[in-house]
Image: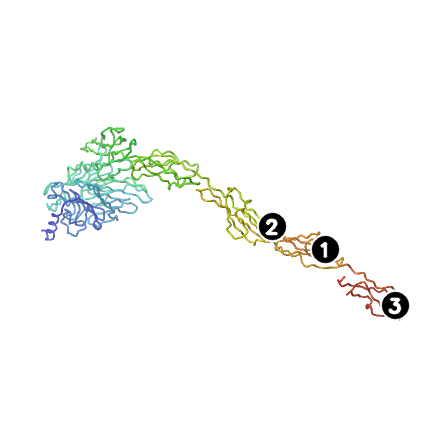
Amino acid sequence: MKSPFIKLLLAILLLVPAFSYTQIIGTSGYMIGDNVEIGINDAGHEGAPLLGTSHNRSNAWVGSPVYFGFVANPQLDGWTDYDGDFFTPGSPENGFGLEIAGTNYHNNASGSLEDIAGSISSYDLEGDCMALVWDGTIGDIDVHIVYRLVTTELYYTTEVTLTNTGLTDYTDIYYYRNLDPDNNVTLSFDYTTQNTIVEQPDPGCEKALVTATSTAPWASYIGLGAIGANFRVSHGGFANRDASDIWNGLGGLTSAEGATVFADQAISLGYKVESLPAAESETFLFTIVLNAASIDAAISSLYYFDYVGGGGLIDECDPVIDTVETCSGIPVEISVDGPNADDYTWEWSPPGGLDIVFGPTVNASPAVTTTYTVTGTPDVVCLSSTIEKSIVVEIMPSPIIEIIDPGPECGEFDLTTLVVNDLGGVDSPIIEFYSVIPDSVDQVVGIWPSDIMYPGDVVYVMLGDTSLGCFDVELLIIDWATPPESGLDAVETLCNSIGASIDLNTLLSGADPGGVWEELTASGAFDPLTGVLDVEGLGAGDYTFIYIASNLPCPNDTSEFTITVNAVPIIDAGADDELCAGESITLSGSGAGIGGTYVWDGGITDGVAFTPGATATYTVTGTDANGCVGTDAVTITVNPLPIIDAGADDAICTGESVTLTGSGAGIGGTYVWDGGVSDGVAFTPAATATYTVTGTDANGC
């Protein structure tokens, strides 16, 4: 018997107004349609906590994490009599898994088995279509699952994308979906269902369908269906966890087409990914059908349109109506696609604007907006109903390009600054640049490789609408100004000698005339109007100048000139000197520093002794290591030798004294006699002798 709490809960549920929505509560998500309601948990499969605003019902305890799986109202009586929950009563069994390299991973039951970590990542409601997205990962395989429900339908689809994010190629990956169909057990208290393999894919028909039906308290139905050679269905067992066994019908499972059993057993669907190379993905879809009359509609929902700018795997979610936009005169390719599309004969109407009317792919180029309908008639007996889908080809405005002249440009032009207007009324057109005239919006050949163009480049501007493929093209014409040229940098070295100066204009090389000079240092000796630097007496050091060449709108060009000024060396010829005739002297210059040289006039060699013949002045020229020159002079006075007179010869008698006195040395002169004789002092010679006197004048000669 139900507890008072459960009775109150059911009473509240009956008062909830009916409306469709999708939402995430906690870690679970819910899709509430007009006729089907689904709960998805954080493990990525049906089975979520109780939702008070839904029609979920189960005999599980109210706090069960998988209390709410999915329910359906194929009776279309406003949820008075309805089916489900389809698996939560008793021991819940529902989920999915993967077999990778022989190892099985599974997210099943009540959350106790969650090998594949993940979570619900997003939900969406657009028009009549709602979607819940779950993303998970096991090893280097990403699992992306999208559940879609059209609010008015009695089926929903599951889209699975497996992506190999690793570096290893995989083969024989198996996916499974396993479900224990309890149907209306909370009303009938009977867990058994009639489980039947309706179809298995074969070359004649690649339809897979397994169903579970019951009759108490009324007829109820659930089916797992798909189209494709890589699908298989089976029934049997309960907590089936081996994906390859499910696909092969092994391990006590039955997969023979037509096999049926009335039992409390699971139904399963398997898919085999034969090869999944590194960085590749594979996507497959199947449907959960909740009304026998909806089988064909559910299978039909697996078909979709592909076209430039849209479409794809149920890209618009609504599997019937779609719209493609194009421009007048621009054909758009439209394909109806899906599993085993070749099993149908496709016919398009109306024929106007189409290149063909039979086949899954046409090129449409109507003059005005047109709705085309494609009808697929099955060519195999297992597909019993036709598929009819409509798509609107809407003729949209085309861009009309207007390029705003950027004015004169110098040397290069940044294409991102170009102003381009659309006169055709297209929303958010894109601008692209090409070296050739493009023939489509998405043309890759000839795309301009950078944001910059230079003089001589040929660039075409395309204004396009990526969603439509419409575009307009115009050649970009730029008024190029010649960039100014200041020429090469230069350096020069000067000595600050008398009268030294330099005209910097003589240093220009490859420069445009008419530029201006500017000194970066403060010599006080530069005339920027003439470019002349007066170097005489300027302090030693480096002086820097720039030459600026201009030609608007180009930026100025500058070259730099460094003038190194070296000081003239202070040369010293030495002090003036005197010597006596016949003596030698050595003259040596100084002041030119290390590496300096000295050159004397008069044939004198620096540092080498010579004998001057007369008094003279000698000039030395000193050159330092920088080549700067200084001079100095020295006077050498040559004094003549005195003419000395010892006096007349004399004769005396033995014993007489005599006085010898020298002359000729002049004032201050001195006389020295040999033989011990003193000048001017009497002495008595012992015998006849010759006496020599040496006289030295005041100059020391």
Q: Residue furthest bottom?
A: 655
Asked whether, in this view, residue 368 is left or right of residue 493, the answer is left
Q: Give me the C-alpha separation between circle 3 and circle 2.
A: 78 Å
Q: Earlier in the sequence, mark 3 or mark 2?
A: 2
Tag 1 secondary structure: strand
Disc 1 target residue: 616
Earlier in the chain: of badge 1 and badge 3, it is 1
**411 vs 366: above or below:** below
Could you say which quadrant of the image residue 295 lies in? top left
The residue carrying mark 2 is 499
Of the pair 443 and 303, the residue shown nearer to us: 443
Quarter of the image where the C terminus is located? bottom right
Question: What's under tag 2, amino acid-wise?
Answer: Gly
- Whether 287 is drawn above or below 563: the answer is above
Q: Find residue 363 and report its image quarter.
A: top left
Residue at image coords 46%, 44%: 556
Q: Is any part of residue 290 visible from this angle?
A: yes
